[in-house]
Amino acid sequence: MGEELRSHGLEVTGGTDEEKQYEGDYFTYEQIQKYPFDDDVGAVITGIDFKVDYSKLALASMYIQRGAKWIVTNEDAFTMQHGYRAPGNGMLIAALESGLKRPDGEGLICDKINTGKPNKAIIDLIRGQHDIPESELSKFVMIGDRPDTDIALGNNSGIASCLVLSGVVTKESEIAEYVNHNRNFTPTHVIDSFG
């Protein structure tokens, strides 16, 4: 993601492709107390990070509290690895949210901007970049394995959706659990796999 942001002229610090900005493998209490915040940091972007640690979460939280915009790429709670749930970007977001709650526990002390699925802005962006009129939406299909983000993106955008039973959801009987929670998770089509 850092490379993509830099290609658009944005300065990037941190992330998964950069050296750590602190000595050792983690922040010490003293390093956190003396950390030299960069007043030019305008946003914290949370995307899946396979090298996440306490120090990254602490810095992200503190920069958000200092007024940086909080942008998340998606809220997928988990990914499937070897048939088990492994942390997804949503778990990183949940970790940050737990420290950014209002004192009454209702809502956050900051705004969180989800630029990824199921935000229909993705489809609007694609249409805009390729001059695709709204009348062509009937030719679109959102394909994915997650009812709560992939299929919801299709429904939020007014396009057909296809749930593939090869990832998060592996049986048709599991779809009802999602749909009972939110009708917006109902796929237009369901297939076992593309293989």
Image (cartoon, rainbow, N blue to C red):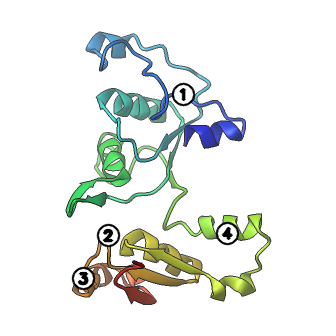
Q: Report which residue position mark 2 lands on.
A: 167
Distance from Cα at disc 3 to Cα at disc 1: 41 Å
Q: Nearer the viewer, residue 107 or 165?
A: 165
Which is in the foreground here, disc 4 or disc 2? 2
Horizontal side of residue 103 vs 163, given as left or right: left
Crowd class of label 4 (few under 14; some 14 to 19; many from 20; radius 10 Å)? some
Q: Report which residue position mark 1 lands on.
A: 13
Horizontal side of residue 9 vs 158, given as left or right: right
Above or below, 50 relative to 37: below
Crowd class of label 3 (few under 14; some 14 to 19; many from 20; radius 10 Å)? some
Distance from Cα at disc 2 to Cα at disc 1: 33 Å
Horizontal side of residue 13 vs 126, given as left or right: left
Above or below, 178 relative to 149: below
Report helix, strand or loop for mark 3.
loop
Q: Report which residue position mark 3 lands on.
A: 171
Which is in the foreground here, disc 3 or disc 1? 3
Q: Report which residue position mark 4 lands on.
A: 124
Task: Assess whether mark 2 and mark 4 are in contact (beta carbons under 8 angstroms).
Answer: no
- The mark that comes first in sequence, 1 or 4, is 1
Give the x, y percent position of residue 65.
45, 33
Q: Nearer the viewer, residue 108 or 93?
A: 93
Distance from Cα at disc 1 to Cα at disc 4: 29 Å
- The mark that comes first in sequence, 2 or 1, is 1
Distance from Cα at disc 3 to Cα at disc 2: 10 Å
Q: Quadrant of the C terminus?
A: bottom left
Residue type at mark 2: give it.
Gly
- The mark that comes first in sequence, 3 or 4, is 4
Q: Quadrant of the N terminus?
A: top right
Give the x, y percent position of residue 191.
38, 86
Distance from Cα at disc 3 to Cα at disc 4: 31 Å
Q: Residue furthest left?
A: 84
Q: Nearer the viewer, residue 74 or 17?
A: 17
